[in-house]
Image: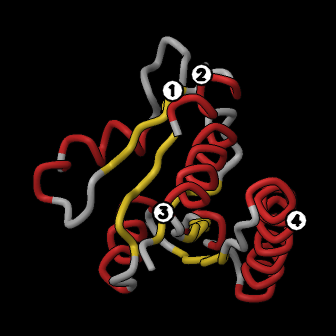
């Protein structure tokens, strides 16, 4: 089964990337893999404090994931999987693509502010020609209706 890999974060554009991935998976008989990356700088504390922060980050990720997963199950009949990795986001995305041969498309949401589309879109699009899977960049301002129309 081909999977759409989408990155879970706190950005506003993440919502459109999740919607797109779920709708495309539903239309094509695919699956959705949701990747959350915990940055290493969150744990540069004493061991006990670092462990506590790591556990709190995982709890936040699970809570955030469940919101998207419920929508995907209820509306698109897609049961997404959650993968949590620790490290630098781009490195961990690339490693997840390498580790899971079923991943066929990376879906990213593009930011809409003046700073540009966001660090992941910027960094990964620079190396798009050498990636083992295509990248779909979903505009953060795209309406739900337009997303439905193009998926």
Which numbered disc flags the more N-terminal residue, 4 or 2?
Answer: 4
* Secondary structure type for disc 2: loop
Q: Can you say whether 48 is above or below 19 in the image?
A: below
- Foreground mark, 4 or 3? 3
Residue at horizontal 35 percent and vertical 73 percent from the top: 97
Which numbered disc flags the more N-terminal residue, 2 or 3?
Answer: 3
Which numbered disc flags the more N-terminal residue, 1 or 3?
Answer: 3
| Residue 59 falls in image quadrant | bottom right
| Residue 19 falls in image quadrant | top right
Q: Would you say the residues marked 2 and 1 are in contact, meaning their CB atoms lie under 8 Å apart?
A: yes
Q: Residues under labels 2 and 1: Cα distance?
A: 5 Å
Q: Residues under labels 1 and 3: Cα distance?
A: 17 Å
* Secondary structure type for disc 4: helix
Q: Residues under labels 4 and 1: Cα distance?
A: 25 Å
Q: Would you say the residues marked 2 and 3 are in contact, meaning their CB atoms lie under 8 Å apart?
A: no
- Foreground mark, 4 or 2? 2
135 sits left or right of 108 in the view: left
Disc number at residue 63? 4
Q: Residues within 10 Å of mark 4 (few under 14, many from 20)?
A: few
Viewer-side residue, 40 vs 103: 103
Q: Residues within 10 Å of mark 2 (few under 14, many from 20)?
A: few
Q: Would you say the residues marked 4 and 3 are in contact, meaning their CB atoms lie under 8 Å apart?
A: no
Q: Which residue is mark 2?
A: 142
């Amino acid at each position: 089964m081909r999977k759409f890999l989408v990155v879970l974060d706190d950005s506003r554009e993440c919502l459109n990337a999740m919607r797109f991935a779920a709708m495309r998976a539903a239309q094509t008989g695919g699956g959705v893999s949701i990747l959350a990356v915990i940055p290493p700088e969150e744990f540069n504390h004493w061991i006990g404090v670092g462990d506590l922060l790591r556990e709190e980050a995982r709890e936040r990720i699970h809570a955030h994931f469940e919101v998207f997963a419920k929508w995907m199950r209820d509306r698109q009949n897609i049961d997404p999987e959650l993968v949590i990795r620790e490290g630098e986001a781009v490195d961990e995305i690339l490693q997840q693509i390498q580790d899971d041969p079923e991943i066929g498309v990376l879906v990213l949401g593009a930011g809409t502010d003046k700073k540009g589309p966001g660090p992941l879109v910027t960094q990964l699009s620079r190396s798009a020609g050498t990636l083992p899977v295509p990248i779909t960049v979903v505009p953060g301002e795209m309406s739900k209706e337009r997303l439905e129309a193009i998926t």
